[in-house]
Image (tube, helix red, strand yellow):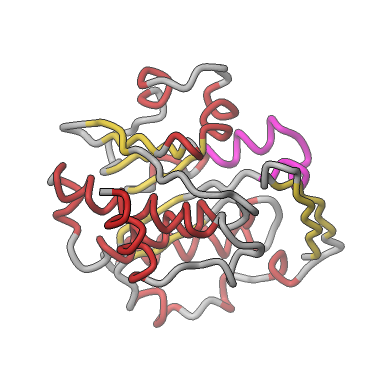
Amino acid sequence: MLGIRTLRADGEREFMFYRNPSADMLLKPEELNLELIRSANVFHYGSISLIVEPCRSAHLKAMEVAKDAGALLSYDPNLRLPLWPSPEEAREQIMSIWDKAEVIKVSDVELEFLTGSDKIDDADALSLWHPNLKLLLVTLGEKGCRYYTKNFHGSVEAFHVKTVDTTGAGDSFVGALLCKIVDDRSILEDEPRLREVLKFANACGAITTTKKGAIPALPTEQDALTLIKGSE
């Protein structure tokens, strides 16, 4: 898949994509490395692989194998509307696997898209709740994030930095979260510890926006800890 990214003055991105087809669309279920999938403690995925066959079937098979092996299923829809035949198809397919995930992260824009509401509030977020879910996260850019579990919910403020490029901030946020809970899922049931993890994730996301590019901008753990300490 060829992607072209342009930046606005405020660091927000606009994407154009070309797939005719691309390799990611052609992955077949029988080509999956099932041994690798079964060894994972967390299986994280998006929604782009749901758009066409055979990669959709490969995606569903990988989820099933990971779940059966005891992995935590983590879902970031990562909405890219230009890749979908229509907004309606995007919404339907994104929601088709919604109730399988145990951790879900959506952006404020994705929350509006999936709920059909122009509000970003607890009621709209909780309309996406399902019984299998352990943690629902809504990222709010410079306003931080909100978190929802079965027993508690709240918000964690963002770190204010000079934004250059927001590409990769959400991925950095989710990666930071998952690296902290991968070996200790009890964090998801302990609000003070979860808030500390989300503070760390917010720091990682913030730092990622201070440089151009997604991978080059990813921070080290020490980078995040330094930002957190400097804000106290």
Tell me residue 93's x, y (percent).
60, 41
The total of numbered circles placed on residues is: 0
Q: Is residue 155 toward the left or the right of residue 192 in the image? A: right
Query: What segment carries the magenta color?
Result: 80-95
Q: Residue at x 75, y 44 (%)?
A: 8
Q: Is residue 59 toward the left or the right of residue 36 in the image? A: right
Q: Quadrant of residue 91?
A: top right
Q: Is residue 90 magenta?
A: yes
Q: Is 103 situated above or below 225?
A: above
Q: Residue at x 30, y 63 (%)?
A: 225
Q: Is 172 situated above or below 157?
A: below
Tell me residue 153's x, y (percent).
24, 31
Considering the image in quadrants, where does the N terminus appear?
Answer: bottom right
Tell me residue 172's x, y (percent).
47, 59
Q: Residue at x 45, y 41 (%)?
A: 98
Q: Residue at x 47, y 65 (%)?
A: 62
Q: Nearer the viewer, residue 213 or 211?
A: 211
Q: Nearer the viewer, residue 207 or 201?
A: 207
Q: Is 215 situated above or below 173?
A: below
Q: Quadrant of residue 124?
A: top left
Q: Is 100 situated above or below 172?
A: above
What secondary structure predominates along the stretch shown in magenta? helix
Q: Nearer the viewer, residue 56 or 3?
A: 3
Tell me residue 223's x, y (percent).
39, 67
Q: Is residue 164 toward the left or the right of residue 225 in the image? A: right
Q: Nearer the viewer, residue 101 or 192?
A: 192
Q: Is residue 187 toward the left or the right of residue 162 in the image? A: left
